[in-house]
Image: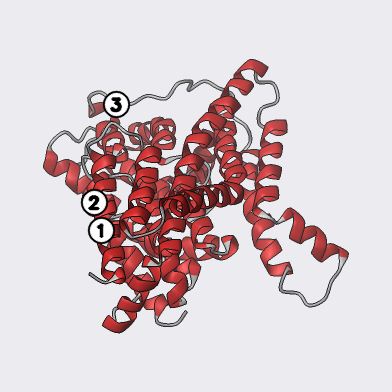
């Protein structure tokens, strides 16, 4: 057996064991990823001590690049949650777009909200707004619920500073500003499809909110909400600063203004400024203990996320150090396969097997980043390929699937599949086509 064959077989065996651990074992994803990294290196012929060093280096580098960024992001999400900013944004979109455009308003509400808050809690927080609209207008709760869920999925999966895209971008070393722009643009055709699909499913299942059985309720419908402008600023500040910094950086020569914008547009600084703005505007007048508890909860959930991402970075570094990434890259080149399909297919398979889109993105990024670098694939495109792949066929092993179908009252398996599995798969097709076409020019 050649060393190249041994490395490839080692990676395959390690991934099979990793997937088993993620799906069947009681071990959490962090431990599973570390075990996968160890097996990849040792079975591939690396010296065990070098494997351990590669794991530590990959873990540390990833943590250094992304740890603070992710903590700030989840803390912004908690600020929006505690202050009622999410509900304020949703109501402002509905009011601004007017009667007859409620479905589009739900998509936009979801998109903005999930830049900072995970899909499941964001959906649960915003679903009472969809119920209220359904009761007042007679629009199907299926239509409004799927529109809201689709908008949340758009940003959660494709656009930083949402955790999955920004984590994947960090591992692939992709430009965050470009990720924001391309993730937004690639998601537009999906959003258009979701708007039409929501209307169609609303006609097929015309039930309004009053007709539903048990649904997931939000906590405090009587909270005094902040203004839409203040509600949006903790999200918009980082986005604006990062995009502005990217544009200013292209200006020739050195200047004080360029230096200032380059500094404050660094993702960590930009996210920190957004967080501070939210704390000192949205949380004014809210009990200090409640604020402290919310921020602590944000730190706790953020720690779980970036430890998982760092473990993925450890696996990626072992793949890089073992040389298996180089071997696979050369094989892809010789076979004449479009290289961009590698992260897309792997993310798709991981999504189907274990259900979590974020885990699919981060694990795919860890495995394929060395391959994409060797093949010269644009890091932004590689990241988006993994992100789009993670959208495929949401079903029973996805917690978001259950949050949506339970809330809208879809109990029959056929209705559940039509409600969420089908539209996520069509979005996967749309995004995959876009990624492939972009790869021909970028």
Picture coordinates of residue 182, whole percent (x, y) = 49, 66
* Residue in the image at 49% along x and 55% along y: 159
* Residue in the image at 46% along x and 50% along y: 49
Please tell me the numbered disc located at residue 96: none
- Left or right position of 363 against 299: left
Residue nearer the viewer, 231 or 157:
157
* Residue in the image at 41% along x and 63% along y: 322
Asked whether the viewer can see residue 125, the reply is yes
> Label 1 neighbourhood size at 10 Å, few (<14), some (14-19), many (20+)?
few
Q: Earlier in the sequence, mark 2 or mark 3?
A: 2
**Which residue in the protein does label 1 denote?**
12
> Label 3 neighbourhood size at 10 Å, few (<14), some (14-19), many (20+)?
some
User: Which element type, helix, strand or loop, lies under badge 3?
Assistant: loop
Q: Quadrant of the N terminus?
A: bottom left
> Label 2 neighbourhood size at 10 Å, few (<14), some (14-19), many (20+)?
few
Q: CA distance from mark 2 to mark 1?
A: 6 Å
Residue nearer the viewer, 304 or 3:
3
Numbered disc in front, either 3 or 1: 1
Judge whether 175 appears above or below 120 on screen.
below
User: Which element type, helix, strand or loop, lies under badge 1?
Assistant: helix
**Which residue in the protein does label 2 denote?**
16
Q: CA distance from mark 2 to mark 3?
A: 38 Å
User: Dividing the picture into quarters, in which one does residue 389 lie?
Assistant: bottom left
What colouring does the structure picture have?
secondary structure
């Amino acid at each position: 057996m050649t060393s190249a064959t041994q490395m490839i077989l080692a990676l395959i065996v390690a991934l099979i064991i990793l997937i088993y651990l993620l799906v069947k074992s009681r071990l959490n994803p962090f431990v599973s990823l570390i075990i996968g990294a160890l097996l990849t290196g040792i079975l591939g012929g690396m010296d065990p001590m070098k494997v351990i060093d590669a794991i530590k280096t990959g873990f540390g580098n990833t943590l250094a690049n992304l740890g603070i960024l992710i903590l700030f992001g989840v803390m912004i999400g908690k600020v929006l949650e505690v202050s009622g900013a999410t509900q304020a944004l949703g109501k402002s979109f509905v009011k601004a777009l007017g009667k007859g455009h409620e479905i589009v308003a739900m998509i936009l509400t979801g998109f903005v909200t999930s830049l900072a808050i995970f899909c499941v809690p964001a959906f649960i927080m915003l679903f009472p707004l969809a119920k209220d609209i359904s009761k007042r207008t007679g629009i199907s709760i299926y239509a409004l619920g799927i529109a809201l869920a689709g908008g949340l999925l758009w940003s959660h999966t494709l656009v930083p500073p949402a955790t999955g895209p920004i984590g994947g971008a960090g591992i692939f070393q992709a430009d965050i500003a470009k990720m924001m722009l391309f993730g937004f643009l690639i998601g537009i055709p999906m959003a258009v499809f979701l708007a039409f699909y929501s209307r169609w499913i609303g006609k097929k299942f015309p039930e309004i909110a009053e007709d539903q059985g048990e649904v997931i309720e939000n906590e405090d419908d009587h909270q005094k909400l902040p203004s839409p402008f203040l509600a949006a600023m903790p999200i918009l500040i980082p986005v604006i600063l990062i995009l502005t910094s990217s544009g200013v950086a292209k200006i020739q020569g050195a200047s004080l203004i360029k230096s200032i914008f380059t500094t404050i547009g660094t993702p960590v600084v930009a996210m920190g400024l957004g967080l501070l703005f939210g704390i000192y505007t949205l949380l004014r007048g809210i009990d200090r203990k409640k604020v402290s508890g919310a921020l602590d909860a944000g730190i706790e959930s953020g720690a779980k996320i970036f430890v998982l991402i760092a473990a993925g970075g450890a696996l990626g570094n072992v793949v890089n150090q073992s040389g298996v990434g180089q071997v696979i890259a050369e094989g892809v080149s010789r076979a004449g396969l479009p290289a961009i399909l590698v992260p897309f297919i792997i993310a798709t398979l991981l999504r189907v097997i274990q259900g979590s889109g974020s885990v699919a993105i981060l694990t795919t990024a860890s495995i394929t980043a060395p391959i994409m670098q060797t093949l010269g694939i644009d890091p932004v495109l590689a990241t988006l390929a993994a992100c789009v792949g993670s959208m495929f066929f949401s079903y029973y092993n996805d917690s978001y699937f259950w949050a949506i179908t339970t809330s809208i009252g879809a109990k029959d398996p056929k209705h559940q599949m039509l409600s969420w599995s089908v539209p996520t798969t069509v979005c996967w097709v749309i995004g995959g086509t876009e990624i492939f076409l972009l790869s021909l020019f970028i």
